[in-house]
Every structure is written in C-alpha cells, then in structure tokens.
Image (cartoon, rainbow, N blue to C red):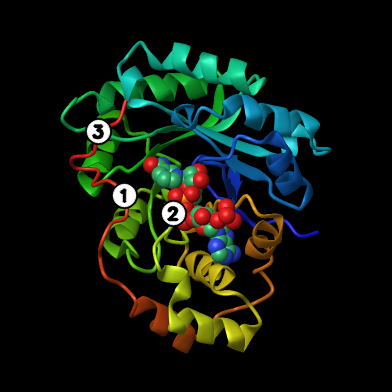
Amino acid sequence: MTSAPLIDLNDGRTMPVLGFGTYSIDDPGVMTEAIESGYRLLDTATRYENERAVGRAVADAGVSREDLFITTKLPGSEHGRDTPRAALEASLERLGLDHVDLYLIHWPLPRVGKFLPTWEALVELREAGLTRSIGVSNFLPDHLETIVDATGVAPAVNQVELHPYLPQAVQREADARHGTVTQSWSPLGRKSDLLDHPVLQRIGQKHGLEPGPVVLRWHTQIGAAPIPKSATPERFRANLGIFDVTLDEEDMAAIAALETGERLGGDPAEHEEF
Ligand code: NAP
C-alpha cells in the first residue's frame, strides 16, 4: 500500500500532496476503503452534506486519527466575524471529531464583502485548536492580498479549480508569493472530455498509466496538490499509484499545450453560493 508524500505548509505543518475528494459521495464504505487503500486526506465541505459519512469512515478505518488529514469548508451563509465558530463546531459534531486539520472559506463572495472578517475569525479558530491549519478556496490574487495585508496571516492552502484546460499559472504564482499551497479541485476536469484526449492516452501508454493518473502526476509535478474524486475502487487506487512514475519535459510540454483557459465551475469574482 502506498500513501501520498507530504507537502510542507507555511504554518509548519504538512499535508498529503494528493487527497480524496468526497463531493457527491455519501457512502462511508467507499471512503473507508479509500483510507484503507492508502488515502490519508479526505476533502469534504458543509455544502456537500456528507460530513457524517466522512466521520463514519474515519471511525471505521483502521488508521489512527493523527495519521489522517481532514479538510472541511465554511459555507457562504456563515461568513462574518462571529458566525464561523458555531459553523465549525457544528461540522465537528457531524464529523465526530474534536478538530479538523484544515478549515477553508469555501468561496470569497466578493459582493457579500465579508471575507476579511471571516478570515479573522478563522485565525482565532486555529488559535483555539478547533482546526490545525486554515486556508481559503477560490480566492483570486486580490482577495489573498486583502486578507494577508490586513492580518499578516497567509492561508496555508488555496483550493482552486485547476486541470490541464485551466492550469492557473497566474493564480499559482500569487499563491506561491504567500507560501500558500495551491490545491486543485476538479483536477481531472470532472465530466469534461479531458480524459479522452489523445495526448493523455499517448503519454499514458508510454508510462503504463491511464489518462487520469497521468493528469494527477502532472499536478504534483507543477507543484499543485490534487484532490481527485472517484467512487470506483479500481480508479481511486490507480489515482494514488503515480509516485513511482515521472513525466518528462516532453510530456509536461504536451500537457501544457492543452490549456484552453475555460472554467468548468464558477468564476470566483462573481460566483455566489450559500
Ligand atoms: P474530478 O475529481 O476532476 O473528477 C471526478 C470524476 O472523474 C468522477 O466522475 C470520477 O468517476 C472520474 N474519475 C476519477 N478518477 C478517474 C480515473 N482514474 N479515470 C477516469 N475517470 C476518473 O472532479 P470533482 O469531484 O469536481 O473534484 C474533486 C474534488 O474537489 C471534489 O470531490 C471536492 O472534494 C473538491 N471540489 C471543491 C470545490 C471548491 O469549490 N472548493 C469545487 C468542486 C470540487 P467515478 O467516481 O465514477 O470513478
């Protein structure tokens, strides 16, 4: 059994460089099997309405809590200076845990205009020990500047849409300026045609990998931390089995050429969900 290598965070902690995305999975058995097959990071969110199932999987898997890295996210309805504490406590109750490893602001909601006081609240939640690390999701470079300038605390992680069609070079540079790890959501391009691309098929044949694992290896080689979702054991095992393969310069250039710049999900400058 292999587990993903760890990546350093800017707060002195570490995080598995590849994790298990749980969006749309509510069967704890699938997640228990993922943990037992080597996954150590589970990514959930209040909005996914599966925190109880994640908690069940953590309790059932024969892996100690300290070896697992559990991420959840604050929904838009709870932005503010005073609301995040109760929101995180409710998540912890559903998860059956006394702390998470990473708590993220799910979306910046710039029109609502409360992401700065929300970030200040997360800083306190970390100090209170309810979460080990704090971060953001879908924060554009100017959102990051705003919270770092005001608080002096840079997010450990910024979780953004990232895949070969949208490699996010500018966003990754902005994250890196703050020592913030860029974590990739929809790393496989979700339900797009990405994994059917002949370039990925060809690179896969060269290395004995399916296109999905090729894409995940590309993420880790550009310094990003993907959280692929799969409810299919054969696929989620293959997605983790990438670390003894290295893509060469030619492979990386061929994947870079797939960029279209098109988002599959919402634009953080406008997207609102609560
Ligand atoms: P994704 O991981 O890019 O793609 C998931 C799809 O790929 C599923 O249909 C899965 O099918 C399939 N798949 C997985 N491995 C495969 C493989 N090796 N070969 C072929 N197909 C494969 O998309 P996502 O679920 O949107 O994103 C991943 C995670 O990111 C989510 O689960 C969630 O945790 C997080 N996320 C965060 C945000 C945010 O705003 N922060 C937004 C979206 C997602 P099967 O399940 O049938 O195997």
Q: What residue type is labelled 2?
A: Ser
Crowd band around label 2 with a 10 angstrom C-alpha radius: few (<14), some (14–19), many (20+) = some
Q: Which amino acid does label 1 sit on?
A: Gly
Q: In screen coordinates, is 257 left or right of 239?
A: left
> CB of residue at label 1: within 8 Å of ligand 1?
yes
Q: What residue type is labelled 3?
A: Glu
Work out whether 141 lies above or below 195: above
- Asked whether disc 1 touches disc 2, contact meaning CB atoms under 8 Å apart, the reply is yes
Question: Can the viewer see residue 226 in this picture?
Answer: no
Residue 31: x %, y % from top left: 68, 41
> Is tag 2's residue or tag 3's residue first in the polypeptide sequence?
2
Q: Is mark 2 on a helix, strand or loop?
A: loop
Question: Can the viewer see residue 30 in this picture?
Answer: yes
Crowd band around label 3 with a 10 angstrom C-alpha radius: few (<14), some (14–19), many (20+) = some
Residue 97: x %, y % from top left: 66, 22
Q: In screen coordinates, is 173 left or right of 52?
A: left
Residue 265, numbered circle: 1
Query: Real-space Cα distance between discs 1 and 2?
Result: 9 Å
Kindly identify the residue that appears in the image at 43 percent across and 37 percent down: 135
> Considering depth in this image, is 154 or 16 the residue closer to the camera?
16
Q: Is mark 3 on a helix, strand or loop?
A: loop
Q: In screen coordinates, is 218 left or right of 175?
A: right
> CB of residue at label 2: within 8 Å of ligand 1?
yes
Q: Say which residue label 3 marks.
A: 272
Q: Say which residue label 2 marks.
A: 186
